[in-house]
Image (cartoon, grey):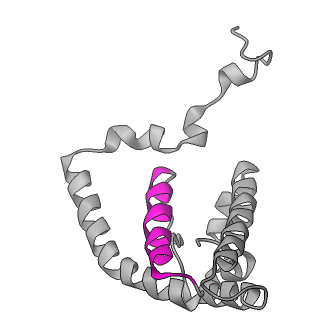
Amino acid sequence: MPITNGSPHLSKLDWGKIFPFLHWKHLINRRSTRADVMAGITGAIIVLPQGVAFAMIAGLPPEYGLYSAIVPAMIAALFGSSHHLISGPTTAISIVVFTTISPLAEAGSASYIEMVLTLTFIAGLFQFAWAWRGSAPLLTSCPIPWLWASLPGRPF
């Protein structure tokens, strides 16, 4: 049995568990790619303007709305899909971020943006911890308002 870094368990690591797209990459063909491109274009038409508006509601410059609409969707696509997936900003999250951070710094300032990014990073750490512990399937069945309340920094 090969040993990696002194641990025999690391050599048996199922990379498909960490990166689910490794299990379904063989299903990608011309037809599915075309459908994904059409879905992406349709989603972009709706999500990009919303992302800009939600960033402004959160007190951030509009370009952060573009980042928060594009990057999470690209990353989420690699890790599977969910009928309950929200991979971008929402009104509730934008308002919670604004009301949480605005008393601490002027909206749009460098310190405000830094605080929002720190809040986002911490929320992302919680999400990563939940996924790492295997709680992610449980979260996909949680009501959307509960997720809004529990993950206020995500996606900015």
Q: Nearer the viewer, residue 133 or 114?
A: 114
Q: Is residue 78 above or below residue 101?
A: above
Q: Which image quadrant is residue 26 in?
A: top left
Picture quadrant of residue 145: bottom right
Residue 134 in the magenta stretch? The answer is no
Residue 54 in picture, x, y percent from top left = 51, 86
Task: Kindly identify the residue that appears in the image at 56 percent across and 82 percent down.
Answer: 60
Residue 61 on the magenta segment? yes
Q: Residue at x 33, y 73 (%)?
A: 44
Q: Which residues are magenta?
A: 60-78
| Position of residue 87 measured from the top left corner of the image (x, y, whole percent) | 51, 69
Q: Is residue 83 above or below residue 109?
A: above
Looking at the image, is 78 positioned above or below residue 114? above
Please tell me which residue is depicted at 76% across the width and 50% down the height of the picture: 133
Q: Is residue 43 left or right of residue 2?
A: left
Query: From the image, which quarter does the C terminus lie in?
Result: bottom right
Question: Horizontally, is 79 left or right of 25 in the view?
Answer: right
